[in-house]
Image (spheres, grey):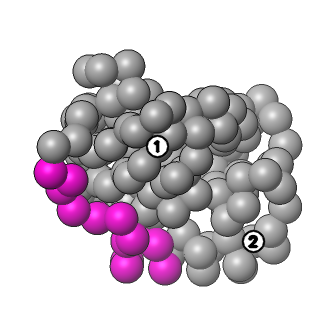
Amino acid sequence: MLPEALARQIISDHGEHPRGRGELAGARHAARDNPGCGDQVTVWVRVEEERLAELRFTGRGCVISQASASLMTQVLAGRSLAEVRDLAARYRAMVMGEAPPDPALGDLVAFAGVSRLHARRRCALLAWNALEAALAGG
């Protein structure tokens, strides 16, 4: 697990300066919003030969939802769909407090502390739910 100060720095950096932001022409996408707070994220994916060739997002929201989407684009792009689904399941389990931080998640372990903040779990999972829907064709 990352020291709390480093985790906050990673989340703050990605929340204020998100990577992977912007539409992706010709991509499948799924939009999701968090009715509890109004955050909105649209995830754009391009899949080639069972690999997540490119991943981007658009939307607005709190630092946690935007940082999670930003880091998701960095960690998952270029991976096989099997790897994407595995890492998404590991991330979800960590955020929900069902599993400890997993080094395979890289900087995404910065969100481990969100498991203690029940209202913020939805924020941390918003883009991931949209990704799941996009990969399912929705």
Q: Nearer the viewer, residue 86 or 38?
A: 86
Q: Can you identify the residue that label 1 sits on?
A: 52
Q: For the residue carrying disc 2, how many other residues have a C-alpha within 10 Å: few (<14), some (14-19), or many (20+)?
A: few
Element carrying mark 2: helix
Q: Is residue 59 visible?
A: no
Q: Position of residue 52 (x, y in %)?
A: 46, 43
Which element is circle 1 on?
A: strand
Residue picked out by circle 2: 4
Within the image, what quadrant is residue 113 found in? bottom right
The percent position of residue 120, horizontal first and vertical second, equals 50, 46
Cα distance between the residues tagged 1 and 2: 31 Å
Task: Tell me where the magenta segment starts and ends, as one range.
Answer: 13-25
Residue appearing at x 65%, y 57% in the figure: 108
Which amino acid does the dot numbered 2 rest on?
Glu
Residue beneath the point at 30% across and 20% down: 137
Pointer 1: residues within 10 angstroms few (<14), some, or many (20+)?
many
Q: Is residue 67 above or below residue 83?
A: below
Q: Quadrant of the C terminus?
A: top left
Residue 71 placement, left or right of 97: left
The percent position of residue 80, horizontal first and vertical second, equals: 58, 39
Determine whether 20 is above or below 105 in the image.
Answer: below
Residue in the image at 46% along x and 34% along y:
49
Q: Are marks 1 and 2 in contact (CB under 8 Å)?
A: no
**Which quadrant of the structure image shows residue 18?**
bottom left
Q: Name which residue type carries label 1.
A: Leu
Prevailing secondary structure of the magenta residues: loop
- Where is residue 114? Give x, y as percent: 63, 50
Q: Earlier in the sequence, mark 1 or mark 2?
A: 2
Badge number at residue 74: none
Q: Is residue 124 magenta?
A: no
The residue drawn where x is 60% and y is 80% is 9
